[in-house]
Image (cartoon, helix red, strand yellow):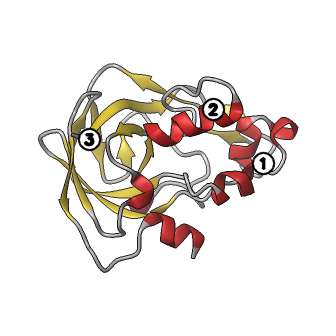
Amino acid sequence: MASILAVCVVHALRPDPGPVGVTAIDKRAVSRPVRVGPYGLRADVQADRKYHGGPDQAVYVYGQDDAAYWEAELGRELPPGWFGENLRIEGLDPNAARIGDRWRLGDDVVLEVTGPRTPCATFARWVGGDDERGWVRRFRDAARVGAYLRVVHRGSVRAGDPVVVEHTVPEAPTVRDVLLG
């Protein structure tokens, strides 16, 4: 059964040379339940709301299998939150999810898959700047970017909660299809 490994919220805003001047990519796992509302997780923030966040990108989910792949590729541990994700899950591939699929998390949260995460220069700087040249393309081309979801029903989530696909849209493209299309 699929489950939430970690619930992650912003740890600290960090200076960033990009146009906004700060980034909220530094997310870390928390042990407490976290409320989920229409704009995402309580205690989280998106510094660049032009490209991140909002109702259609309220929650960013990343798969543990993908994190393990990148740990092997980069030769370092990548703890939950390192990708800027709100939820690290196992047992379900967010990249294979279909646009419009609905997931139930725990008892009451329902999320709907809206699309892939688009890697950006801020993420490349977070990964290691010049040490990881070509990171945006490399991350995208591996097609292991995770998924954005909108909130259909509010509630609380915590590590250990089950993730159940309640509804799927068989004719819809997958997150990976949209990314590479």
SS class, disc 2: helix
Q: Residue at x 61, y 31 (%)?
A: 71
Q: Work out whether mark 3 precedes mark 2 in sequence or the reverse, and give the earlier one.
A: 3
| Mark 3 lies on residue | 2
Element under disc 1: loop
> Which amino acid, by three-letter code, is at mark 2?
Ala
For the residue carrying disc 3, how many other residues have a C-alpha within 10 Å: few (<14), some (14-19), or many (20+)?
some
Q: Closer to the camera: disc 3 or disc 2?
A: 2
Q: Please give the label number shown on residue 72.
A: 2
Q: Please say whether residue 127 is visible from this viewpoint.
A: yes
Q: Which residue is at 37% across, 29% downward?
A: 6
Q: CA distance from mark 3 to mark 2?
A: 22 Å
Left or right of 41? Residue 22 is right
Under circle 3, the secondary element is loop
Q: Position of residue 148 (x, y in %)?
A: 43, 56
User: 144 above or below 112?
Assistant: above
Q: Which residue is mark 1?
A: 18
- Residue at (68% x, 31% y) in the render: 14
Going by the numbered disc 1, the residue's amino acid type is Gly
User: Is residue 58 at least partly visible in the picture?
Assistant: no
